[in-house]
Amino acid sequence: MKLDEILAAAWADPANTTIDLPPVDVNQVLRDHYDVTPDLTYTRTMLWDMEVRKASAPDVYIPSAVKPHSAEKFGEGDDFTRVSEQRVWLDRDTFGTVIERVHVDHDRQSVEFVGLPEWQAPDGRRFTATTDQPLFHVEHWVEGAEDQPLNRWRIVFLTTEPDQRLVDFFTELGRSPYLRDFVEIHIRDVLGHTLTRKD
């Protein structure tokens, strides 16, 4: 099955825990909650560039979730597998191995991540995903106009019944007035702007 078909099937299963985070209007958040020097209109093209970079280097773009220098990418092009050490969603002091098949869809400007329980790398190493949390699949994608891009993402956990604790965690995450770390890092480190959160 293609990754989008796996995601769709998982999303449709009522036993799973599904979370669709609210759209983030990047430029509106920048205006309301940041001082940016020099001024910046963040574009849809920029947001997609960030998503492509993040797919290959989660430890660089998501330091709040992925242990530094822990990510490995296997394969080239738009289809690959990545392995990293990530914080367990409901136990942020604990790290566990996460294995993901990845597809970068430039036409839809979407990146799909399908979690695997185990995987053997081309060099013979075997990886086993943490059992401290259910496997999960993720989709990150871009919506909106070129000068008003929307950052979108959703996640589905493969549970035996919906887990309200996970729903509550992501609901709280979605309430943050600030951009996620990956957008901040892209603006600072790739685009070269100074970015300061307002009090």
Image (cartoon, grey):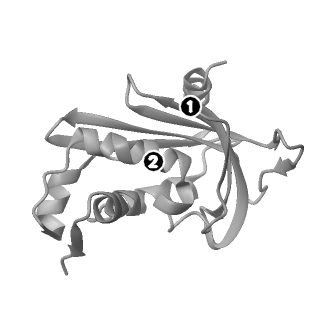
For label 1, the residue is 77
Q: Nearer the viewer, residue 106 or 159?
A: 106
Residue positioned 62% across, 68% down in the render: 67
Q: Secondary structure at mark 1?
A: loop
Residue positioned 87% across, 48% down in the render: 125
Q: Is residue 152 above or below residue 186?
A: above
**Which quadrant of the figure contains the C terminus?**
bottom left
Q: Nearer the viewer, residue 48 or 11?
A: 48
Q: Quadrant of residue 82?
A: top right
Q: Nearer the viewer, residue 98 or 8?
A: 98
Q: Quadrant of residue 17?
A: top right
Residue positioned 50% across, 61% down in the render: 60
For label 2, the residue is 53
Residue 15 seen in the figure: no
* Side (left or right) of 150 relative to 162: left
Q: Is residue 57 above or below residue 48?
A: below
* Side (left or right) of 26 relative to 113: left
Whole-number angstrom distance, CA of label 2 to CA of label 1: 12 Å
Say which amino acid is labelled 2.
Arg
Residue 66 screen position, x and y as percent: 58, 63
Say which amino acid is labelled 1.
Gly
Neighbourhood count class around disc 1 (C-alpha, 10 Å): few under 14, some 14–19, many 20 upward: few
Neighbourhood count class around disc 2 (C-alpha, 10 Å): few under 14, some 14–19, many 20 upward: some
**Which quadrant of the figure contains the N terminus?**
top right
Between discs 2 and 1, the one toward the N terminus: 2
Q: Secondary structure at mark 2?
A: helix
Q: Is residue 9 above or below residue 145?
A: above
Q: Nearer the viewer, residue 95 or 109?
A: 109
